[in-house]
Image (cartoon, helix red, strand yellow):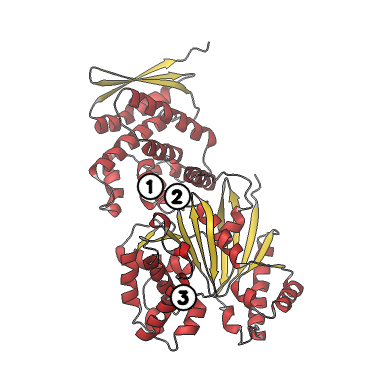
Amino acid sequence: MEQSRIAIIDIGSNTVRLVLYKEQGAGIEEFRNVKAPLRLRRFLNDQNKMSEQGIQLLLEALKNFREVLDYHDVTEVECTATAAIRQAANKAEIFERVKNETGFQIRLLSGEEEACYGLSAVLKTMPVENGLTIDIGGGSTEITLFENRKLKHLYSFPFGVVSLKEQFIDEDRMKPKEQKKMAEYIKSEFGKFDWLSKAPDGVIVAIGGSARNLANLQQLKENYPPLGVHGYELTVDALEQLRKELSPLSYSEFEKVDGLSNERADLILPALEVFYQLSLHTKAKGLLVSSRGLRDGIVLERTKNGLWETSEDVKKNGIQRLLTVYGHDTEHHFQMMKLTEKMLAGFEKEGLINITKKERFLIEQAAALFYLGEYISSSSKSRHTFYLLINSLFDGFTHREKAFISLTASFTNNSTLKQYLEQFKGWFSKEDIQKMREYGALLKLCFSLNSSKRSIVQDLQVKQKNNQVFITVYCTGNEMAERYQSDKQKRHLEKALQTSVILQFKQKINQ
């Protein structure tokens, strides 16, 4: 099937970027990302006119982007511009020259549109109901307040990392008095709005490169598992410690800091100050980092599939995107879901497991992704599944939920589970790990009941009698492969439940 492709050009105050996307189920997948850190705001003079040098740099970058688009045969392109162009007194000249020399028609976004697209990306990829979003660019900072997943307030502040640096930092090292003046200015700006006095649920979602960079720094300090930065929680204490460690450094010293992007070395302190002051001002727990932002919000508006009314919708869309990306077997997927549903219902009815609504949802998602890595190697499907899922972008899930699903969906035996859990020390209780064993073993049994990938199991029933569990499996067709594999794999469930499991296969008679 032909995948829909679209490109977004984002002309920002700090970075000009081209991102190529393809539609994946109810989500989007970025497949090329080209950037030029031009810092266009530097080229605005006292009258806010952009210099010829700045315009030429922009034109050069856009001409390069045109070549990339032609190479990848992408014709649907949206070219957007934000604060630097918005503030330029000669923006009409820039629009005309860009169109004449590159063919791109610039769409100038207002600060309000910028904020709304960022919020849209957050609500479609993160499990949040209430909170604030903040997106720090080079020349402006957009903040929204949302409740029950609906926008309530927004404002585009007239400062960004580049403008704050220009305004408050004179040399290659920030002085304490400069930091104090910057903090006072930021606090005074936030204090202008009553709705910014408190973050709903203590949640601030931080969008943009500066937030991602700070998350990378902190994850390296913590030796954090490779779960990515989307959904990572950067606490107030962590922000305060980073502020103490980074504030005294010169720009040349910043370049040696592991995990810090060289092109952001001189801009990270203004960003950190804004995040820190907003967290204190709103009494938030810290930041929830989003790797999705303005560009993703624009593209997601165009997707034909998906429903994003609730957090659960977002999670289902995230799972569907993963299944589409990794080319799952649709028929096997539906069979796994059917068998898992029947198995859970039977075990629950017999009092063999106690399962909450939240746990049921997570297990169902683990069932959908179970042994997804089989397409890479059938003999190493557990290892490949774990690696793929841990390193994939899980839209809608917390990092803890992502880890739980990945560990359950790759279950093969207790030893391997312990091995995978090594990088998650302290994340899960003994009860949590026991549940992974039980649910992982149950999913593995369901997987074995479709080992021939023919979906011959039509129904199953679970009964407990005399401390034994009897599972009657009703089939249409020869079940030799399913019988062999399930008899071999049931021992994992027996160990987890501390009881024997008896499998009985019967032919289903069509009425």
**Image location of residue 38, percent across then percent down:** 57, 78
For badge 2, the amino acid type reads: Pro
Q: Nearer the viewer, residue 63 or 294?
A: 294
Which mark sits nearer the N-terminus, 1 or 2? 2
The disc placed on residue 127 is 2
Q: Quadrant of the N terminus?
A: top right
| 10 Å crowding of disc 2: few (<14), some (14-19), many (20+) | many
Quadrant of the rendered image containing residue 56 = bottom right
Please determine whether, in this image, residue 466 is positioned above or below residue 6. Answer: above
Residue under label 3:
264
Q: Foreground residue, 376 or 464?
A: 464
Numbered tag placed on residue 226 in the rendering = none
Comparing labels 1 and 2, the label whose residue is closer to the camera: 2
Q: Check if mark 1's residue and mark 2's residue have beta carbons within 8 Å.
A: yes
Residue ID for mark 1:
401
Earlier sequence position, callout 3 versus callout 2? 2
Mark 3 to mark 2 CA distance (whole Å): 29 Å
Of the image marks 1 and 3, the number of the one nearer the N terminus: 3
* Side of 163 where 100 appears, left or right: right
Can residue 220 be seen?
A: no
Residue 84: give x, y in percent of width and height.
60, 76
| Residue at 26%, 46% in the rendered image | 418
Q: Amino acid at mark 1?
A: Glu
Q: Residue at x 57, y 83 (%)?
A: 42
In the image: residue 426, left or right of residue 333: left
In the picture provided, is 440 more to the left or to the right than 56? left
Disc 1 and disc 3 in contact, CB within 8 angstroms: no
